[in-house]
Image: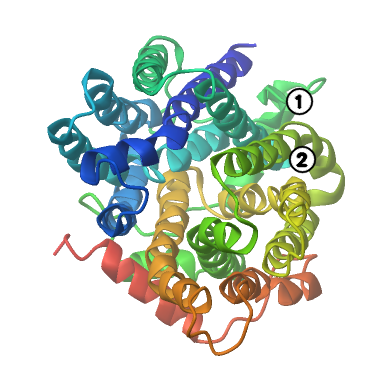
Amino acid sequence: MKDLAGLGHLFVVAFLFHFSSFMVLPAITDVTMEAVCPGRDECSVAIYLSGFQNAITGLGALVVTPIVGNLSDKYGRKALMTLPVTVAILPLFILACNRSEVYFYAYYVMKILAGIFCEGSIHCLSLAYVADHVGTKRRAAAFGLLSGVSAAGFLSGTLTARFLTTSSTFQVAAAVGAAGAIYLRAFVPDSGAAVSFHDDACDPLLQGSSCSSAASSSASSDEELSPRLPPYKGVLPSPSDMVALLTGSLTLSTAAMITFFYSLGEHGLQTALLYYLKAQFGYSKDEFANLMLIAGAAGMISQLTVMPIFAPIVGEEMLLIVGLLGGCTHVFLYGIAWSYWVPYFAAAFIILSAFVHPSIRTNVSKSVGSNEQGIAQGCISGISSFASILAPLVFTPLTAWFLSETTPFNFKGFSIMVAGFCTVGLQWNTFLNSVQFEIYLPHVTKDLMSFCAAHCLCHQH
């Protein structure tokens, strides 16, 4: 029961963190417009400010997330998790005080700095924490529960924001964020470094096994999951060591490549979707809010109920295949939408696409040793952050081109279709090799890993 309480406390922190982070999203656009271009409905300066913020945040997260993950392997998850949870409160507190132009730019700078430490770090550390406490047999279900709790925070925050004024929204968000940080320090047990749980019998999601039998299976598991990195000194291993970690098995290489292309498609969809729906069907604030609620509810249902039930039965490899199929279908439906209701229908496919990231993270977690959970999850998060940098550079001009009057042919959803092909690119190879979760990857895999690792560690030397 002690381990169960530990995971329960982590889920509370994850819920509060995502609740406070996402409840300000519906209001931040109006706050930005009012501060930068008061009295106007369109403002290119605000768009470029948002784009610059996303690019810098993604670049910073690419560097910081592997560092934070690796430090958590040495000094414990709780100590490192405190940093992003606490830093995320500061920008919310600024706008809770005032939303004038001076306060907005103070928020803008602090939001970039907070995003560098929070974008990917809290998710990476939470996954590593769960991996410390949950045995490999039930890890996919546990990762799904964590994602479901995060989705529940997103949904609850979005719903709450609809009933609050703009000023109250930021005050409540800051208060909830502070409550999450206090709860983390007071109730969440530490793990990582000197605390590690590998016994399926002591798994809080399992019942009816003896700890003594699990101990023997844990020993054999540790032999199979011996560290893939040699001992090193300093904050991070060398770039060659990180490349060796990511390319040391087909499982890790596959996970890295699928993460990159799927994240590229995901962020490309996020870049293009709102502008496309506005131009194609005249969507406004209310339609966007409804779409977000459907997406949030679908993700929450999938990860809190569907995935925990089916993961032990069919395995995370099959769930990954189903998730990739659902993900590309959901994106393609957006691109070819012929009526205003089709995007709502497409959003329902998130019930399937929500399987993708927990399944990938589960396979990564099973493929490394207990003292490499943080660095491995951090590297995957870094690759996702790298894709989030590239996506706006590729899809913003492509979307603007096909929504303009100079488009080469009349297909406003073309950029979204391209994003769909990014999400579908590797899944058929994954299907053909689903039993072992291994696919053939050309030498470009190692080149991509080297490139990402070099950028992650460029400040080390």
Residue 61, percent from left and from top:
32, 52
Farthest residue to the front: give it.
39
Q: Is residue 319 left or right of residue 61?
A: right
The three-letter amino acid code for the residue at tag 2 is Met
Residue 26, percent from left and from top:
47, 35
Residue appearing at x 67%, y 54% in the figure: 356
Farthest residue to the bottom: give it.
408
Q: In the picture, residue 276 is in which quadrant? A: bottom right
Residue appearing at x 63%, y 17% in the figure: 4
- Quadrant for the C terminus in the image: bottom left
Q: Mark 2 — residue? A: 307
Residue 274 vs residue 303, the one in the foreground: 274
Q: Is residue 217 visible?
A: no
Label 2 sits on a secondary structure element that is helix
- Quadrant for the N terminus in the image: top right
Label 1 sits on a secondary structure element that is loop
Crowd rating for badge 2 (residues with CA inside 10 Å; few <14, some 14–19, many 20+):
many
Q: Mark 1 — residue? A: 206
Q: Is residue 344 left or right of residue 400?
A: right
Residue appearing at x 80%, y 65% in the figure: 435
Which one is earlier in the sequence, the residue at label 1 or at label 2? 1
The three-letter amino acid code for the residue at tag 1 is Leu
The scheme the figure's colours follow is: rainbow
Q: Is residue 369 left or right of residue 176?
A: right
Task: State which mark lies toward you, 1 or 2.
Answer: 2
Instruction: Report how far apart the C-alphas of labels 1 and 2 lie in the structure.
Output: 16 Å
Residue appearing at x 36%, y 12% in the figure: 182
393 in relation to 218, above or below = below
Count of all numbered marks drawn on residues in the image? 2
Residue 189, percent from left and from top:
45, 17
Farthest residue to the right: give it.
313
